[in-house]
């Protein structure tokens, strides 16, 4: 009986901790609005346009000034204004904005696409406001993979990575809901 019970729990554990694809497990948690609201406070005065990378339900819109031109980007159409691009298929719009807003998206980018994505952010925006759940905050790789996360950086490595692509850390907030929150400013245009 104990053997059967152990096999049952082992199967459940494997199902729960299997490497997932975000598209298979997608959901939107209303509590994420708090993170987005806190992140939106990092948007500098003078920003007149931004791209919400991985916009989901476009919750950011309710926290920005009405005169900021908003572009929502996601891998599937969320409304009639969504720019549909799959970052893991190396699709990114040819757009220039003041700021790229990336809440809860970076973890889902395939490791092999990170350099490509960062170069596109450099060409696209002068500022980045970004969340990242680092290994420091969530260290279990199996659990991270079960969320569909495709890359795994410590906070210091993440900051160094973004800096290597022409950005400098401007502001770091205390973690919110298990996510590091950063604002970077572009200091170098990449070729």
Image (spheres, grey):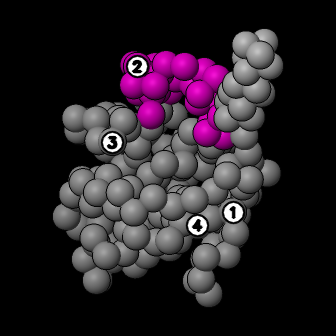
Q: Foreground residue, 40 or 159?
A: 40
For the question of whether residue 96 can be seen, the reply is: no
Residue 140 position (above or below residue 97): above
Q: Quadrant of the N terminus?
A: top right
Question: Residue tagged by mark 3?
Answer: 177
- Disc 1 or disc 3, which is closer to the eye? 3
Say if mark 2 contacts mark 1, CB within 8 Å: no
Counting residues from the N terminus, which is met first, the one under dot 1 or under dot 3? 1
Q: CA distance from mark 4 to mark 1?
A: 7 Å
Question: Residue tagged by mark 2?
Answer: 136
Residues drawn in magenta: 133-161
**Residue 38, quarter of picture:** bottom left
- Disc 3 or disc 2, which is closer to the eye? 3
Across and down, in percent, residue 110 comes to: 70, 37
Q: CA distance from mark 1 to mark 3?
A: 24 Å
Q: CA distance from mark 2 to mark 4?
A: 28 Å
For numbered disc 2, what is the local secondary structure? loop
Q: Foreground residue, 131 or 166?
A: 131
């Amino acid at each position: 009986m104990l053997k059967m019970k152990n096999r049952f729990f082992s199967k459940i554990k494997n199902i729960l901790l299997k490497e997932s694809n975000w598209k298979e497990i997608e959901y939107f948690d209303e509590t994420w609005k708090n993170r987005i609201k806190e992140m939106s406070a990092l948007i500098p005065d003078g920003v007149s346009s931004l791209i919400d990378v991985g916009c989901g339900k476009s919750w950011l819109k309710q926290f920005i000034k009405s005169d900021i031109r908003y572009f929502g980007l996601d891998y599937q159409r969320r409304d009639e204004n969504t720019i549909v691009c799959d970052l893991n298929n190396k699709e990114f719009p040819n757009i220039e904005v003041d700021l790229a807003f990336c809440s809860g998206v970076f973890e889902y980018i395939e490791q092999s696409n990170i350099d490509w994505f960062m170069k596109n952010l450099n060409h696209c925006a002068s500022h980045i406001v970004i969340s990242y759940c680092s290994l420091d905050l969530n260290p279990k790789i199996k659990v991270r993979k079960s969320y569909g996360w495709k890359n795994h950086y410590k906070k210091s490595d993440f900051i160094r990575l973004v800096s290597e692509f022409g950005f400098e850390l401007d502001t770091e907030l205390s973690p919110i809901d298990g996510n590091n929150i950063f604002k970077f400013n572009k200091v170098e245009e990449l070729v």
